[in-house]
Amino acid sequence: MLKIAIYQMQVIPGEPEKNMDKVEQWLNQLDDEIDIAVLPEMWNTSYKLSELNRIADEEGKVILPFLQKKAKEINMHIFAGSIAYKSGDDIYNRSLVINKKGQCINTYDKVHLVPMLNEHHYLTSGKKKPSVFQLDDIEMGTIICYDLRFPELSRSLALEDAKVIFVPAQWPKSRIDHWKALLRARAIENQVFIVACNGVGDCDENTFGGASLVYGPDGELINALYDEEGTVEVELDFETQEKIREAVPIFNSLRTDLY
C-alpha cells in the first residue's frame, strides 16, 4: 500500500514566492503517514505566460533546493507537479520528482504544448518522452495536462511497467468533462493507477476546473475533490492491481506485429 496526498491548489498568478509559502504550509500539515505529496501543474507561476521570462525559476535555483530541503525535513517523497523552469533562452513546463532523501530523481519537460492557451508562443516543448522512475520500489511515470489527450504517451509508460501515472494539470473548467473521461480511459486501457492533480481558481481569462481524481486500474474512482482548494488522500493497493492485470491480460494480447 502507498499513501498519497494531492494538493488541489489555487495558485496565485505570477507570485512564485507566495505560492512557495502556500506549498510549504500545506506540506507541513500533512500526516506523517503520507508517502508521496503531489502538486499541480505550473504551481509557481500559474498561466501568466507573458511574464514567465521574468518570474520563471532560472535553472531551478530557487524551487529545487526548497523542495529538496522540505522532502528531507518531512521525510516524504514530493511529486512536485510542474513549474515554469527557465534554462538559457528557453522556458519549459517541467515536472520534478524529489525523493525523501532530497534527491531529484526525475524530470520531464511537457512535450505537447496547448495551442488553445498559446503555450507554444512562450514555452519550449520537451525533446524527450517521459521516463519511468521508482519511489518505494514502485515504477511510476508522469504526463502533464494536455499530454493526456495523446494516449501513446501513457501507453509508452505502461509498456515500461509503470504502475502509477501522475497527471499534474491546470485543466480549464470549460473542458472538465474531457478531463474526467480521458483520465478514466487512460487508467482502464493501461491498467494503471491514475493520480490527477488539477488546480482551481482563475488566471486572466482562464478558470481551472479542479476535479483532482484518482482512478484505479479497473477505472474505478477511488477518491476525488471537485471545486474547492483542498487535499485528496488515497491509498493505492498494488496487489489488487496485479489481480486486475491477471484477470484481463491486455498486454499479452498486444499485436505488435500490426501496430
Image (spheres, rainbow, N blue to C red):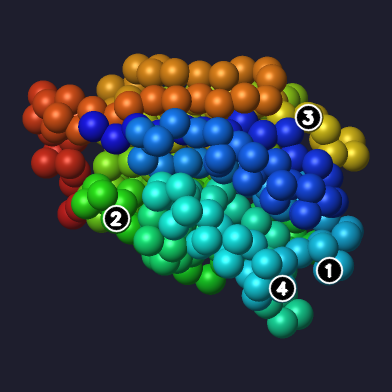
Res 188 quadrant in image: top left
Q: CA distance from mark 4 to mark 3?
A: 26 Å
According to the picture, the residue beneath numbered tag 2 turns out to be 134
Residue for point 79% across, 48% down: 18
Res 210 quadrant in image: top right
Q: Nearer the viewer, residue 177 or 93?
A: 93
- First along the sequence among labels 4 and 1: 1
Q: Position of residue 158 (x, y in %)?
A: 29, 47
What's under tag 4, amino acid-wise? Glu
Q: Nearer the viewer, residue 244 or 20?
A: 20
According to the picture, the residue beneath numbered tag 3 turns out to be 201
Q: Quadrant of the N terminus?
A: top left
| Residue 78 in sight in this render | yes
Residue for point 47% across, 41% down: 37
Tag 4 secondary structure = strand
Q: Position of residue 38 (x, y in %)?
A: 50, 41
Left or right of 155 on screen, residue 104: right
Tag 3 secondary structure = strand
Specify few, some or many for label 2: CA neighbours under 10 Å numbering under 14, 14-19, or 20 or more: some
